[in-house]
Image (tube, grey):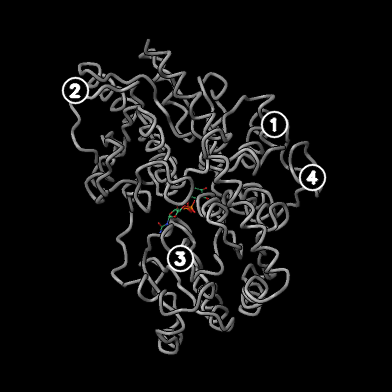
């Protein structure tokens, strides 16, 4: 990724090791750019499969290197189960991460610190084996992290006997506001185990980094910090959208999906300002055929133009009649977009989102109101925060059959785009954007924390 820089003097060298999925690579890559802008050498370690099958954009700031997840030919799709993938990732990953550290030991820029995804707690053992600093990086909201922390330590026992549940530091939570592993008890046990295992050894890490900003989650940051001291280092959004201090590109720089060839910018320019609903469910979610059909007709019924990311694997679920009836003036369906560029267009009025944490914090940092339609994992809790805590959006009501009906989709879009309450949501979103910019700007909470983290690495080297 980064052009060769032999002889350049760095303050230290960090090796950033994300969980190999889009929602985890993006924030880690962006955080690496921020550290590089502060004089560190930053190397992002991705899996061999990702490095050979994807086409990262060259970055002037971040180096790229590879480790193995034990599935070099096909990545996750080659694994028999989630459980077997995670265990191969741990065995092959520990070995190849160690090899990488040994490789750099022979150069003039040995690694000083491993920043590892909280989903991969075994990476701390690798860091300690080589007497390096180990910093754990939490990619999800602090609220969600704290819920998992409490469950892992037996401070919140499952099943929770009654709702709403009141926990110091957190808003009052109904069952549907809980992460999906609790909301739908017994679902995805391997993932549930993984998110709880984030806290297996977090107390032994030299630093706990969370991709949020202080004012966004102040109460839970303060509460959790008493038990597990942490640093807020977010939002990890390209600097071009925030403080503009880092020489930066307009997106993260590594898409795991082929970008759509449609000219999204030209299409957006044909639409009135603040009129377009941008619809995306992130990199992992899959919707049922029935749900896709309701979504299609609900968006159509809202009367607003919309730009909808429909991944190739989801395309066959779109009704043919709908495809025939939507016109180029009213809607554009794309396979994958440069989401940040889209969100920052003045034509976008609302983000219809699954509330993955990156999408949520991107919307807040760019100042967009949302319709929240969470699917699983942390998204249900993020949707609660969007609607009731930050008051920047409306959450869809799910029917008794588990489907969000077209009338409900239409109602939610109209509420955000046309109602008085929608105007307040947009004003609130602008306020959060200003606070996000404040956090990353010189002297802001995030900026101070990142400086303190860099100092820790420099001290370790000296
Ligand atoms: C997953 C989980 O679902 C999420 O809840 C968790 O917090 C992180 O891991 P994902 O579902 O992919 O992530 O959602 P999200 O966190 O929103 O990340 C998606 C990323 O892909 C965002 O950074 C977004 O900007 C990017 N994206 C999405 C694109 O660049 N183009 C697109 O068309 C869609």
Residue 151 in percent (x, y) is at 67, 34
Find disc 4 in the rendering and name its residue. Answer: 165
Quadrant in which the C terminus appears: top left
Which mark identifies residue 7? 2
Q: Which label's residue is closer to the chain start, 4 or 3?
A: 4
Q: Nearer the viewer, mark 2 or mark 1?
A: 2
Q: Is residue 412 left or right of residue 64?
A: right
Q: Quadrant of residue 112?
A: top left
Find disc 1 in the rendering and name its residue. Answer: 222
Q: Which label's residue is closer to the chain start, 2 or 3?
A: 2
Query: From this viewpoint, which residue is outermost toward the top?
Result: 462
Between the C-alphas of marks 2 and 3, the distance is 41 Å
Q: Is mark 2 within 8 Å of ligand 1?
A: no
Q: Is residue 341 left or right of residue 294?
A: left
Mark 1 Cα-neighbour bin, 10 Å: few <14, some 14–19, many ≥20: some
Residue 37 in percent (x, y) is at 37, 34
Between the C-alphas of marks 1 and 4, the distance is 19 Å
Q: Does the CB distance between marks 2 and 1 fall below 8 Å?
A: no
Between the C-alphas of marks 2 and 4, the distance is 57 Å
Q: Secondary structure at mark 3?
A: loop
Count of number-bearing discs = 4
Find disc 3 in the rendering and name its residue. Answer: 345
Q: Does the CB distance between marks 1 and 4 fall below 8 Å?
A: no
Between the C-alphas of marks 2 and 1, the distance is 42 Å
Decide which of 284, 308 is in the foreground and name it: 308
């Amino acid at each position: 990724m980064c052009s060769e820089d032999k002889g350049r003097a760095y303050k230290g060298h960090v090796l950033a090791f994300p969980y190999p999925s889009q929602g985890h690579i993006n924030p880690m890559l962006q955080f690496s750019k921020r550290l590089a802008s502060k004089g560190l050498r930053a190397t992002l370690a991705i899996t061999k499969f990702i490095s050979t099958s994807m086409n990262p954009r060259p970055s002037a700031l971040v180096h790229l290197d590879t480790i193995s997840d034990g599935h070099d030919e096909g990545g996750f799709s080659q694994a028999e189960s989630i459980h077997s993938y995670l265990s191969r990732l741990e065995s092959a990953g520990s070995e190849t991460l160690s090899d990488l550290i040994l490789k750099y030991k022979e150069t003039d820029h040995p690694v000083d610190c491993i920043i590892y995804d909280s989903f991969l707690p075994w990476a701390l053992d690798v860091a300690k084996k080589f007497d390096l600093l180990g910093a754990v990086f939490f990619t999800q909201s602090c609220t969600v992290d704290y819920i998992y922390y409490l469950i892992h330590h037996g401070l919140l026992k499952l099943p929770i006997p009654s709702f709403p549940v009141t926990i110091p530091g957190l808003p009052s939570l109904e069952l549907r506001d809980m992460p999906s592993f609790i909301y739908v008890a017994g679902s995805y046990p391997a993932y549930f185990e993984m998110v709880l295992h984030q806290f297996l050894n977090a107390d032994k890490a030299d630093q706990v980094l969370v991709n949020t900003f202080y004012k966004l989650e102040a109460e839970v940051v303060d509460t959790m910090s008493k038990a597990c001291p942490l640093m807020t280092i977010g939002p990890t959004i390209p600097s071009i959208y925030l403080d503009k201090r880092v020489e930066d590109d307009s997106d993260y720089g590594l898409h795991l999906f082929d970008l759509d060839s449609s000219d999204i910018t030209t299409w957006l320019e044909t639409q009135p300002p603040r009129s377009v609903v941008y619809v995306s469910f992130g990199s992992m979610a899959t919707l049922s055929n029935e749900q896709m059909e309701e979504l299609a007709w609900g968006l159509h019924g809202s009367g607003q133009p919309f730009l909808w990311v429909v991944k190739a694997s989801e395309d066959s679920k779109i009704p043919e009649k709908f495809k025939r009836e939507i016109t180029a003036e009213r809607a554009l369906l794309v396979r994958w977009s440069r989401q940040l560029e889209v969100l920052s267009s003045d034509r976008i009025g609302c983000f219809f989102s699954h509330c993955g944490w990156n999408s949520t914090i991107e919307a807040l940092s760019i100042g967009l109101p949302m319709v929240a339609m969470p699917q699983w994992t942390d998204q249900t809790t993020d949707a609660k925060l969007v609607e009731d805590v930050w008051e920047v959006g409306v959450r869809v009501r799910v029917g008794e059959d588990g489907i969000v009906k077209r009338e409900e989709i239409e109602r939610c879009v109209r509420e955000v785009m046309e109602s008085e309450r929608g105007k307040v949501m947009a004003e609130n979103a602008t306020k959060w954007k200003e606070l996000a910019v404040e956090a990353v700007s010189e002297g802001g909470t995030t900026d101070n924390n990142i400086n303190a983290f860099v100092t820790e690495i420099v001290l370790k080297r000296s």
